[in-house]
Amino acid sequence: MLTAARIIIDPELRELVPPLTDDERQALEANILRDGCREPLVLWRGHDILLDGHHRYEICQRHGIEFAVTDVDLPDREAAADWIDANQLGRRNLTPDQAALLRGRRYNRLKKPRGGDRRSKGQNAPLNVASRLAGKHGVDPSTIKRDGRFAEAVAKTRAIVPDIEQKVVSGKGPPKAAVIKAADLLEKHPDKAREVLDGKRTTAHVVRELRREETVTRLAQLAAREAKAPTGVFDVLVIDPPWPMRKIERDCRPNQTDLDYPTMTEEQLAALTIPAAEDCHVWLWTTQRFLPLALNLLERWGLTYVCTFVWHKPGGFQPVGLPQFNCEFALYARRGSPVFLDTKAFRTCFEAPRGRHSEKPEAFYEMVRRTTAGRRLDMFNRRRIEGFVGWGKEAG
């Protein structure tokens, strides 16, 4: 028997141990009072620091009950901390977040380069550690790596919530996703990080708010920028107006927010000077909602509507109670009598993958380049398009 006076309780290592629930503590105390302390306490050999049995030790001390001890040989405090986490993972009924934290702490310790036999063996070492721990704890390696990120986030957020680790270990901490998001926010938005950890704001709410703030800043920058005005007239026009609409965000229900580019009213669009040559091809992009307005604009610009090209998209927004809007329209109109160079395999309906919001597919521009000649202008373009002059505040 080792006397209680020789047992050392290390506060830092003690905090690694998840506390018992009230029911667990009462059951453990009843068992010890009835049967004695049947399982030996575990000490760090040569240091007499208690690694396992903190709850049993406290109960035995309070009731004057004898206990046995054993010890383990460990090289340093990192190894001692890892032994505690591994032991708890193997013996305790833990919440998912508690288990994730313990696994993550193990992963982050073991993937560090170390001296002696435990030195990292190159860039594959973290992968090997993740695979080894995954096998021991019955999860997959990607889960172990996510756990590592969670443990890093817990450590990082101690800067604003000093007892965050104790809260998570005790099962009373914020959700794992909130901790990870708070860690990401900490450097630039510490106030928002604290609100997420305190449960005052959801991560989705904060993400939307930051997105809006970034949009406002970007719109202000664009508003201060002069659009690159085209010179002369053009034989081909592609016009993708910034329609007066709001973007839909769907974190839980459809929520609207400002678009990340400046929009224009119907009157502003109608007042535009369209630099069309006497014989000019024109494609005007529009959506279901603005189709009537687009047809009206063609007339007000003095253009003759001919037909509608349809971009069949993979997926799309579906309003409540209506079909899915999985297409966009490019209304083809003319000034004068322009001629197409090639009408082979020239169809009004085409399929193409989606890009960024409002970005039109490269397949469309390939079709226009193949079938038309002369100077081409892409009005309100958001990126450089080969074979086109760009015009707009976002023109590259």
Image (cartoon, grey):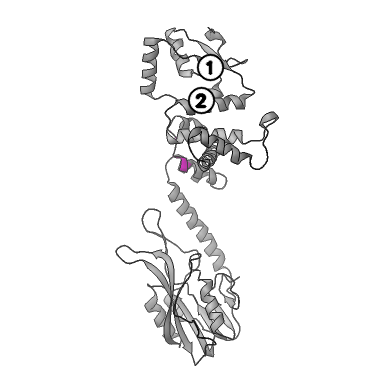
Mark 2, secondary structure of its residue: helix
Residue 47: image location, x then y, percent: 61, 16
Q: Which residue is mark 2?
A: 87
Q: Residue furthest front?
A: 135
Give the vertical position of 163 relative to 33 (above or below). below
View extreme (left): residue: 321
Identified at 53% across, 17% down, the residue is 42
> Does the image show residue 215?
yes
Q: CA distance from mark 2 to mark 1?
A: 11 Å
Q: Which residue is mark 1?
A: 42
Q: Does the CB distance between marks 2 and 1 fall below 8 Å?
A: yes
Q: Residue at x 41, y 65 (%)?
A: 316
Choose between 34 and 192: the one closer to the eye.
Answer: 34
Residue 361 in picture, x, y percent from top left = 51, 71
Q: Secondary structure at mark 1?
A: strand
Q: Which residues are magenta?
A: 172-178
Q: Quadrant of the C terminus?
A: bottom right
Three-letter code, disc 2: Asn
Q: Between residues 216 and 2, which one lies in front from this camera angle?
A: 2
- For disc 2, the neighbor class at 10 Å (few under 14, some 14 to 19, many from 20) is some
The foreground one among 369 and 140 is: 140
Q: Residue at x 41, y 79 (%)?
A: 294
For residue 226, the mark is none
Q: Amino acid at mark 1?
A: Val
Judge the density around disc 1: few (<14), some (14-19), many (≥20) Cα neighbours within 10 Å.
Answer: some
Left or right, residue 85 beside residue 35? right
Q: Can you name the residue that lies furthest to the right here?
A: 116
Of labels 2 and 1, earlier in sequence is 1
Q: Is residue 106 above or below residue 1?
A: below
262 w.r.t. 38: above or below: below
